[in-house]
């Protein structure tokens, strides 16, 4: 079992920044890859960024150069630094883990990010 708890969402003006955090209930080193997804009203959930246990990062084209994913294995936390935010970034952001040893997808409860124009 893995519990994921997101924090750091909020309301920000366009061009502003936010940092999301996702705290895991167990060692993220043992979990492996972690990711951030988002879902806006009326749309499908989409991958925003992911990071492997080795630190390799992958980003959606829409956020490249603006968002940075990172992980702190000592704190069992993964972060999403979001800069130059745009109104189209408005969504609920979810932390995701799919440990190979589990065969199960785990999701956090989500945190709302709203970017005003």
Image (cartoon, rainbow, N blue to C red):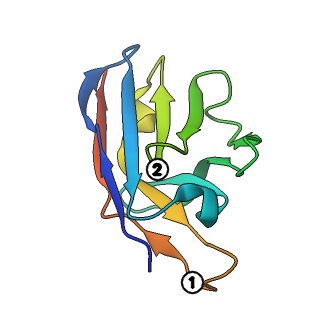
Q: Which residue is drawn at 67% across and 81% down?
A: 101
Local crowd size for mark 1, using a 10 Å CA cut-off: few (<14), some (14–19), many (≥20)? few
- Above/below status of 4 relative to 63: below
Labels 1 and 2 touching (C-beta < 8 A): no
How far is disc 1 from disc 2 in space, using C-alphas? 19 Å
Residue 103 seen in the current view = yes
- Above/below status of 34 relative to 55: below
Residue closer to the observer: 88 or 7: 7
Q: Residue at x 72, y 51 (%)?
A: 52
Q: Which residue is disc 1 drawn over?
A: 104
Name the outermost residue toward the top.
15
Q: Is residue 58 left or right of residue 40?
A: right
Badge 1 marks a residue whose secondary structure is loop
Indicate the position of residue 111 as horizontal and vertical percent values: 29, 50
Residue 44 seen in the current view = no
| Numbered tag placed on residue 76 in the rendering | 2
- Above/below status of 30 relative to 63: below
């Amino acid at each position: 079992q893995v519990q994921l708890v997101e924090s750091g969402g909020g309301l920000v003006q366009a061009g502003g920044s936010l940092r999301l955090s996702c705290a895991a209930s167990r060692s993220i080193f043992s979990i492996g890859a972690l990711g951030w997804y988002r879902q806006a009203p009326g749309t499908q959930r989409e991958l925003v960024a992911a990071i492997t246990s080795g630190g390799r990062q992958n980003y959606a084209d829409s956020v490249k150069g603006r968002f940075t994913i990172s992980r702190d294995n000592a704190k069992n936390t993964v972060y999403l630094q979001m800069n130059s935010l745009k109104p189209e970034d408005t969504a609920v952001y979810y932390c995701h883990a799919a440990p190979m040893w589990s065969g199960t997808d785990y999701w956090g409860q989500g945190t709302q990010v709203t970017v005003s124009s």
